């Protein structure tokens, strides 16, 4: 079957995996399984409810955490020829309203945890004509019950969808500046999900931990997961991760580096007489073999550290504008220090040290932002903003961000990320931001206070200064850090767990 749209992905998965469990989750103490057939039926019911409301072809928002209802609603929207607009459930209600207006949303599916945002949207977003609650048991006032509508709209549904039709608008959670609405087509998402065979067998158990409004989770956990036939277990709360790992016993998870680093710290502190592989089994339920890392830079040493615990980390690289994966390492095809080999549907070139990407996963542009689109795309090439290179075998190496470069008075260019990654190897440094302050390179550090306490450090600032002095001795003079700020609290971060730089 030729897979060109998300409708094709669902049709393929239903035909191939049928009654196998596609999703597994908890309702109170009960574990519920939803089959691939259920996903097909329920996503078609959502398409039919949109048709009933005259909303096919419109822009429709989803606000909530990862749930079965969210997932099948996303496919029901896109497979009706409508445009899905996932919104970050952690945003303030005012910011959600702004994005709803900017994306020309006319219908909203929402989780009751954001009933406050739904109420504000009713009041301040007149363009939104229909609201559907994922949890409401029956229609109340002008809010529809998702479950009631699902039951009333059972039946077959198929729309004629062009692969290059707009499928979703995903707002970036950028570390700087105003968020942009990235327009991705059906082809962008499906090609990214299906072009690379990672040799993951059907029936593999995964657990989804990342925010579902982010494209890394959406494409790799959800779309690719359905295409290859995994059983995806839904983590119901960030507070229950450890408990759910032991309950669901996943074989594989997708994580961002910040989470990987914090997990390693816990594994290390739990060490002692017990063998490392036994520690990992106790922590992760016993079956975890693979962790896919993306969303930010991961120190390659973590790959070796986790290998000691019997877990393979596959480092990858991507961005929302590329649907998102640009490159990934594989168990049988990887290179230390790289962020993986280019995806089969991507090609790359380096222009003034910046990595440019072209391929079927590159976005259509930014919604209603023509100037920003023209700045990001040139003759089909996406300017990633990342500094790096590609070796002769197609492996990608990233050295920093173009817009974060520190340009000194002597003309030297310094990558703050390179310096941060070196210093983060010290256990005392939990988070760090390196920047230019009036031509002086400054490091702002949030120390690991627990580590300092364990080591009985009396003067944390002095200890940090010692680390910086040792670092400076190994660097050319222009790369020296000559100002230190010690933080008492963590840095403010995006919902993708990246530090907001400015």
Image (tube, rainbow, N blue to C red):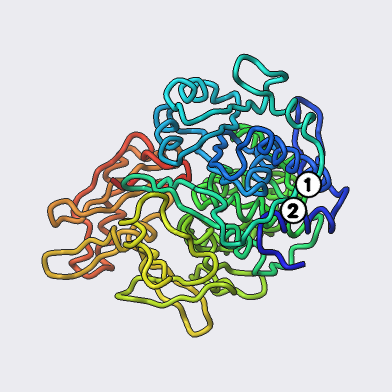
Quadrant location of the C terminus in the rendered image: top left
Q: Earlier in the sequence, mark 2 or mark 1?
A: 2
Relative image position of residue 406 (x, y in whole percent)? 22, 61
The local secondary structure at tag 1 comes to helix
In the picture of the structure, the residue carrying the numbered disc 1 is 40
The local secondary structure at tag 2 comes to helix
Relative image position of residue 413 (x, y in whole percent)? 23, 68
Q: CA distance from mark 2 to mark 1?
A: 6 Å
* Residue at x 57%, y 52% (from the top left corner): 167
Does residue 489 appear left or right of residue 125 in this picture? left
Q: Nearer the viewer, residue 501 or 481?
A: 501
Choose top left, top right, bottom left or bottom right for residue 348. Answer: bottom left
* Residue at x 72%, y 39% (from the top left corner): 48
Name the outermost residue toward the top. 141
In the picture of the structure, the residue carrying the numbered disc 2 is 10
| Residue 463 seen in render | no
* Residue at x 70%, y 69% (from the top left corner): 197
Name the outermost residue toward the bottom. 392
Disc 1 packing (10 Å; few <14; some 14–19; many ≥20): many
């Amino acid at each position: 079957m030729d897979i060109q749209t998300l409708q094709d992905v669902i049709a393929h998965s239903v035909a191939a995996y049928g009654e196998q469990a596609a999703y597994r989750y908890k309702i109170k103490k009960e574990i519920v399984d939803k089959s691939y057939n259920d996903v097909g039926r329920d996503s078609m019911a959502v398409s039919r409810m949109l048709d009933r409301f005259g909303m096919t072809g419109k822009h429709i928002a989803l606000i909530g955490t990862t749930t079965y209802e969210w997932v099948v609603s996303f496919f029901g929207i896109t497979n009706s020829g409508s445009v899905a607009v996932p919104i970050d459930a952690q945003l303030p209600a005012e910011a959600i309203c702004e994005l709803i207006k900017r994306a020309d949303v006319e219908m909203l599916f929402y989780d009751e945890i954001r009933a406050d945002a739904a109420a504000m949207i009713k009041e301040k977003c007149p363009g939104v004509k229909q609201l559907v609650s994922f949890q409401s048991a029956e229609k109340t006032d002008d809010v529809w019950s998702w479950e009631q509508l699902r039951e009333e709209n059972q039946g077959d549904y198929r729309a004629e969808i062009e692969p290059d039709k707009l499928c979703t608008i995903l707002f970036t959670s950028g570390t700087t500046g105003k968020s942009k609405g990235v327009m991705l087509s059906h082809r962008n998402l499906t090609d990214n999900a299906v072009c690379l065979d990672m040799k993951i067998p059907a029936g593999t158990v995964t657990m989804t931990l990342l925010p579902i409004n982010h494209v890394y989770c959406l494409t790799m956990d959800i779309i690719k997961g359905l295409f290859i036939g995994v059983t995806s277990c839904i983590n119901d709360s960030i507070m229950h991760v450890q408990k759910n790992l032991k309950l669901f016993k996943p074989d594989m998870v997708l994580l961002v580096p910040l989470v990987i680093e914090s997990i390693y710290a816990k594994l290390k502190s739990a060490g002692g007489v017990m063998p490392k592989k036994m520690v990992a089994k106790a922590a992760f339920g016993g079956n975890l073999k693979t962790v896919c890392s993306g969303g930010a830079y991961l120190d390659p040493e973590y790959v070796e550290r986790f290998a000691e615990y019997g877990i393979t980390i596959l480092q990858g690289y991507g961005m929302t504008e590329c649907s998102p994966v640009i490159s990934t390492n594989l168990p049988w095809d990887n290179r230390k220090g790289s962020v993986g080999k280019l995806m089969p549907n991507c090609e790359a070139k380096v222009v003034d040290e910046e990595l440019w990407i072209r391929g079927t996963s590159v976005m259509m542009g930014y919604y209603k932002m023509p100037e920003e689109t023209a700045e990001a795309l040139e003759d089909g090439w996406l300017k990633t903003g990342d500094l790096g290179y590609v070796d002769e075998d197609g492996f990608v190496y990233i050295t920093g961000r173009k817009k974060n470069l520190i340009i000194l008075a002597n003309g030297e260019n310094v990558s703050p990320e390179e310096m941060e990654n070196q210093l983060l190897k010290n256990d005392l440094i939990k988070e760090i931001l390196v920047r230019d302050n009036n031509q002086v390179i400054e490091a702002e550090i949030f120390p690991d206070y627990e580590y300092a306490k364990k080591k009985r450090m009396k003067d944390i600032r002095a200890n940090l200064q010692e680390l910086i002095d040792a670092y400076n001795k190994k660097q050319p003079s222009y790369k020296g850090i000559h100002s230190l700020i010690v933080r008492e609290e963590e840095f403010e971060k995006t919902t993708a767990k990246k530090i907001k730089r400015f």
